[in-house]
Image: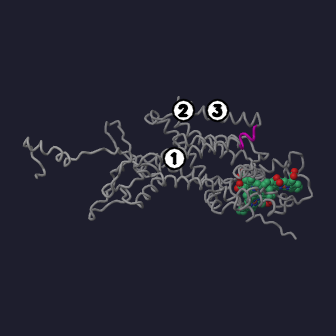
Amino acid sequence: MKVLYSLLAVIVLVLVAYVGVGLLGLHSLFGVMIPYAAGAVFIVGLVYRVLKWAKAPVPFHIPTVCGQQKSLPWIKANNIESPHNTWGVIARLALEVLLFRSLFRNERVELRRSEKLIFGGNKYLWLGGLAFHWCLFIILFRHLIYFMEPVPSVVLFVQDMDGIFEFAVPTLFLTDLVILIALTYLFLRRVIYSQIRYISLSSDYFAVLLILGVVISGVLIRLFYKVDIAAVKELAMGVISFRPTVPEGISLLFYIKLFLVSTLVAYFPFSKLVHGAGILLSPTRNLKNNSRMRRHINPWDYPVKVHTYEKYEEEFREAMKEAGLPLEKEN
Amino acid sequence: MYDADKIITGLIIFLCLITFPIYYNIATGKAAYRPEPKIVTEEKQCVESKGYMRAKHMDLLEEWRESVVREGKRVYVASDGKQYTMSLVDTCMRCHWNKAEFCDLCHNYVGIRLNCWSCHTLPKRD
């Protein structure tokens, strides 16, 4: 059911672009205005999100017990699993962001038919997730071709590497192939495995299907339904230099893709996709495990009025003496 | 304890990074650049319509290549009935002999580098 709703949502988006551009001819709405609006929503939304996070006090660090904390000099500390200085934190975060280290350690508990409980590593999710994210990054980087003039040679180099196998004209990019496989896996695992289906929300399917829609339309444009890419670059350059023009000869399929991208970009700050920014702020990853070296002050501590025992004794000394109670300080 | 200063620094760096192409184009002064491939032939018309050629000339070339190399057929009948010999160098480049100001101009703009010319050599013109 939830899958169907999400699929329906993506189909509706495609139809909106189809009607808007194909039937009503609203090229500048879908080619210029909506992308601007989506970009603005993305930036404002993301800034709002992150500033809201920045306002939250830093929690007391949460030790994830998989490394020896720094303590006595003769006990070997593990500065990456349990960092006590900034370099350790940077290393841990970098491994997390670039290699999805926590996901690599993901374990699955399974009850097999023999009624044995099995704990096993499950690396497929890690592999699929990592492949997807890296491909996405390389593809986005390659798209800089359409936003920069002259095209920097690093971008061309990445594109050459990506198309190194040179099968088919135009070259099929490796990342296009891998991202399709990875996304299909990431989608199917939410459909096939009943446990994962049970915890999946419509928004989980929607994010995957929307990205899949963008990728599929991109591959179709590149391989089968060519558009005039020089015109597409004119459109893109016009938009980012704030002198928008709508060149002739850009096909409907491109506008459909652009509308899906605009939706994705505007949806980003308000959905689970914003984990891209959130990962850097995860307390179990970015806090130093240095509670034995530094005192953590709770920022919302109320300045409690304390009445120490010393003062108490001072106050009631006579009465206590009379009652024969033991006193700490005799005088 | 708050980490707002670090978070805001990170946010600003991120915003600078994603808007980098904007400054880059301002710096290179090429934001408004459009490739204008120069037509040097006397002829009025390309093999197919201009719009078709712009978007689909690679498909046409691919089709020609298949046809010549696989099927041995070297005559292409355009949609207006004219006949052309299917040849990259002898047909396309006869009219568009200014490769650097024609093919390359567009291809550089969209970051395409062709390897065709390592085998199909253009005759020298003077």
Residue at (72, 43) in percent of width and height: A31
- Give the chain of mark 3: A
Per the model, the C-alpha gap separating discs 3 and 2 is 14 Å
In magenta, the rendered stretch is A26-32
Outermost residue, front side: A318
Name the element at disc 2: helix
> Quick check: can you spot residue B45?
yes
| Vertical comparison of A310 with A165: above or below | above
Residue for badge 2: A3
Q: In terms of sequence position, does the residue under pointer 1 or pointer 2 come before the other? A: 2
Q: Nearer the viewer, mark 3 or mark 2?
A: 3
Per the model, the C-alpha gap separating discs 3 and 1 is 33 Å
Q: Nearer the viewer, mark 3 or mark 1?
A: 1
Q: Main secondary structure of the magenta part?
A: helix
- Residue A49 at x, y = what percent? 52, 44
Residue A84 counted in the magenta span: no
Q: Nearer the viewer, mark 1 or mark 2?
A: 1
| Disc 2 residue type (three-letter) | Val
| Disc 1 residue type (three-letter) | Leu
Residue at (52, 48) in percent of width and height: A276
Residue for badge 1: A51
- Residue A96 at x, y = what percent? 45, 53
Residue for badge 3: A12
Choose between A227 and A163: the one closer to the eye: A227
Residue at (71, 35) in percent of width and height: A18
